[in-house]
Amino acid sequence: MQVSMMNLCRLRYCILSFVTLLCSLASYASSHREAPLISNDPLADNTDLYAFKSPDDPNSITIIANYIPFESPDGGPNYYNFGPNVRYEIHIKNKTTTAGDDITYRFTFSSINEDPTTFFNIRLGKQNLKTTYKCEKSMDGGMTFSTIVAEGIVPPNNIGPRSIEGKTVGLEAPDYNSLVEGAINTATSGEKVFCGPVDDPFFVDLAGAFDVGNFRPEGNTTNAPKGTLNRFNVHTIALKIPVSMLQKEGRGVSQAENILDADFVIGVWASASRQMIKTLGTDGEVGYEGKYVQVSRLGMPLTNEAVIPIGMKDLWNSLTPYEGHDLQFAKYFVNPELALYMDDSKFGAAVPSLNALRIQSNSLGAFDFRNGRSGLFGLKGSSALVGTALDDAIFGTLLLPDIASPRAVDLLPIFYTGVPNLAPYQLATGKNNNPLAKGKPFINNFLPTLGDMLRLNMAVPATPRDDSKFSSLGLVQAAVLGITDPAYNANKDLQWIPNMDGFPNGRRLEDDVTTIELQAVSGIVLAAIGLFYDDATPEAPVSPQLLRVLTFNSGPTKNDTSLKGTFPYVANPWRGFDYPEKARF
C-alpha cells in the first residue's frame, strides 16, 4: 500500500501530538512529579498551592503550600519529611511598582535523631528525625529577613497507635490531632503557622488521564473514576495571615471600597531551592554548599503539567515569575495544546472522553477561538473597543496581540495577569447580547505582573462551606448563578454571588481545578461574558453545548476525607497502620 508524503507527514504529526498529550497528562496531578528533574527530588517538589479567604475568619487569608508527592502513610522505616537542606518559600506580590516579592516567608528545617540505637522512627517516647523549623519574613524583596518563628515543631508522621498513643513505647499523645494542635504557632508578627504531614487534599483520576486522556466522569457506573491521591499524604506549610498584613497599604477588609476593590488583589507563588553543589562522601555523608538555586515553583495549578511542553518544564521550574521570565511561555497559553483535542478540525476525535468540550468556532456568527484562528482580533481598532480592556490604550496590545493568538483574550489573563473588572470581563447578564457592553461584575483579581501566580482578591467574602450554593466549580459556578439565578440576574449591579471566592480567584481546598481548567480551555469563560457557543441564540444563550461543558467533570469531584473547619483546614494525615476494610487481602 502506498502512502503519500502528505499523509505520512500528517500521520507523523498525529503520533507526535499523541506523545505530547501523553507527556502533558502523565503529570496532571497538579504539581506532583511534574518535571523530569524535580521528579527525582521529592523533598523539594511543590505539589499544590492554595490561597483563600479563611472560611471561619473574614479578616484573614490562608495560604497553603504542599510539598512531597505520593507519601504512602505506611512508607517506613524512612518516612518522608521536610528536607533539612531545602529552602522553602512562599512569595506574595501586592504592588505593581516593585520588581519582585513584596512579602516573602522562608522556611528551613532541622532534624535530629533522639535515639540512634533503634531502626524505629518512634520508640520509648523518643523520635528519630524529630523536626523543627525556622520561619523568616522579608518585606524588602528578599534583601533582609527577620525570624518570626524561631523553633517551630513539626509533628511526626502518623505511623500507628503504638507509636503515637502508646504508653511507654510511644509518644503517649491523647490522639494524633493533639500533636497537630500543639504544633500551631503564632508568629511574633501575628500570623498563625503550621508545618507538618497532612492528607493530600488534591483529587484527580490519574489512571484515566494516563490512558491518553481517558477521563472518567463522576457517576460513570461502567468504569468508575479512581481518586489517585486517595489515602496519600503530603507535607504542608500553612499560614493564616490578617488581610491588613497582606494589603499593600495595611488596610483591612472593612476599609475596602467594595467586594471587588482592586487595591486588595495579591499574587501568590511558592518555591523550593537547593544549594548548587551536592557532595557524596565515602562515609555515606552528604554535604551541600554554594548559593541556593530554585528547583521547583508553583503558582496556578496545572501550568507546568498541562501547558508547558516537556522540554521546557525544568527551565520553567528554575525561573521566577518576575523580570519578564514568563513571557517566553505565553505562546503556550494563547494557543494551548489541550485545545487541539477539543477541536474536530484538529484532533478532537482522538480523545472521546473530551467530546463534551468543544471550543467556539462561530460564536455570535463571527468569532473563532480555535488554535491559530483570529478570535476577537478582527475588532482591533474598532470604536467598539474604546474604554474596554481590549482597547490598545488600556490592555489591547496584550489581550489582542496578533491575528493568530485567540486565547490571549481569556486564558492568558487568567494565568498571567488576573482578570480586571472591565468590559468585556463581566457576565453576560445585562449586556443585551453585546459582549463588549458592561455586564454584571463577578471578578477582579487583576495584578498585571505578567507572570504565573495564584491571584486573589481579598475583599471578596468567603462562601460558607455549608451554603447550599457552595460549589467545587468555583468562579464558573458563580458565573452560572449570575446568569441564570433570579436572585442574582435581575440587574447588572455588583453584588456578592456565592463562589466568587473560588478558583481562579484564589484557590480553595475544595475547588475542582482540573475540571475548571478543562472547561476554561473549552471556552467557558468566553461564554460567561457573552461570547456564547456556536449553537446559542439570543433567545436561548444557555445552549446544549454550554450545558455539556458545565456538566462535564474530569473524575473525582471532592477529596477523599473531610476537611477541617479551622486552621490549618487540611485533614490530619492518614495513619500507616490503618486501612479501609475493602483493602484487606
Image (tube, grey):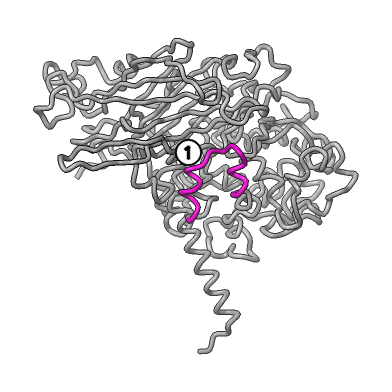
**The magenta segment:** 311-329
Q: Which residue does the image show at 48% across and 19% down from the upper left?
A: 240
Residue 469 visible in this rendered orientation of the protein:
no
Q: Position of residue 262 (x, y in %)?
A: 70, 25
Examine the rendered structure and indicate whether residue 365 appears above or below residue 498: below
Q: Which residue does the image show at 46% across and 36% down from the upper left?
A: 48
Q: Foreground residue, 262 or 289?
A: 289
Question: Looking at numbered disc 1 in the image, what kind of residue is underneath it?
Answer: Arg
Q: Residue furthest right?
A: 383
Q: Which residue does the image show at 43% across and 53% down from the upper left?
A: 26
Q: Residue furthest bottom?
A: 1
Examine the rendered structure and indicate whether residue 54 appears above or below residue 35: above
Q: Position of residue 3 (x, y in %)?
A: 54, 85
Left or right: 145 in relation to 97:
left
Q: Position of residue 581 (x, y in %)?
A: 25, 38
In the rendered image, residue 480 lying in the magenta stretch gets the answer no
Q: Position of residue 146 (x, y in %)?
A: 45, 16
Residue 414 visible in this rendered orientation of the protein:
yes
